Amino acid sequence: MSFDVLGDVNYLAVLVATIAWFVLGAIWYAPPVLGRPWQRSLGIEMPEGFRPNPLIFVVTFVVYFVTALALAALARATGSQTVGEGTVLGVVTGVGLALMILAGGALYERRPEPGVWFAINGIFNVIAYLLVSVIVTVWD
């Protein structure tokens, strides 16, 4: 694999996949969905009317874009083109990379509810990697 594969990536697909991931996260971590249990698992409480710094959303978008770009490059480098191949890429990277990195964090970072934190973040990341991998794989 070389960086030349970046020239074969469909950047519109990467952008759409990034937006899909961002929307998924907005729903997943919304307080009425899993936001409150996620906050509790971290031991944080948001004051009424709290508004986060908008920079957090910009950085999150950039992180998702770079990750979607990496997944697109992997899809191209492996010759993946079908929904099935995108699904395999999503499972391998979602479980083999994202989920395992989160497992280490859950073990060592001393969160108040590490199992809850791991489940919420882990399932979200596996679903996101699946979603992004399928989009960037089939959208050629």
Image: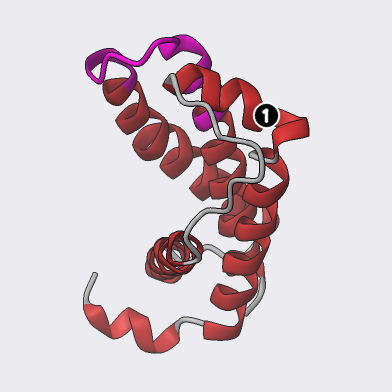
Identify the residue at image location x=41%, y=30%: 99
Image height of 96 relative to 11, above or below: above
Main SS class of the magenta portion in the image = helix
Q: Position of residue 20 (x, y in %)?
A: 67, 62
Q: Image check: 118 left or right of 13? A: left
Residue 59 lies within the magenta run: no
Q: Which residues are magenta?
A: 106-121
Q: Residue 46 lies in what quarter of the image?
A: top right
Outermost residue, front direction? 48
Q: Residue 71 lies in what quarter of the image?
A: bottom left
Identify the residue at image location x=57%, y=35%: 47
Q: Nearer the viewer, residue 97 or 139?
A: 97
Image height of 79 relative to 98, above or below: below
Residue kind at label 1, given as amino acid type: Leu
Identify the residue at image location x=51%, y=62%: 57
Q: Position of residue 72 (x, y in %)?
A: 47, 68
In the picture of the structure, the residue carrying the numbered disc 1 is 34
Quarter of the image where the N terminus is located: bottom left
Q: Nearer the viewer, residue 63 or 51?
A: 51
Q: Position of residue 14 (x, y in %)?
A: 54, 74
Q: Image check: 109 left or right of 97? A: left
Q: Neighbour class for label 1 at 10 Å: few (<14), some, many (≥20)?
A: some
Q: Nearer the viewer, residue 87 or 18?
A: 18
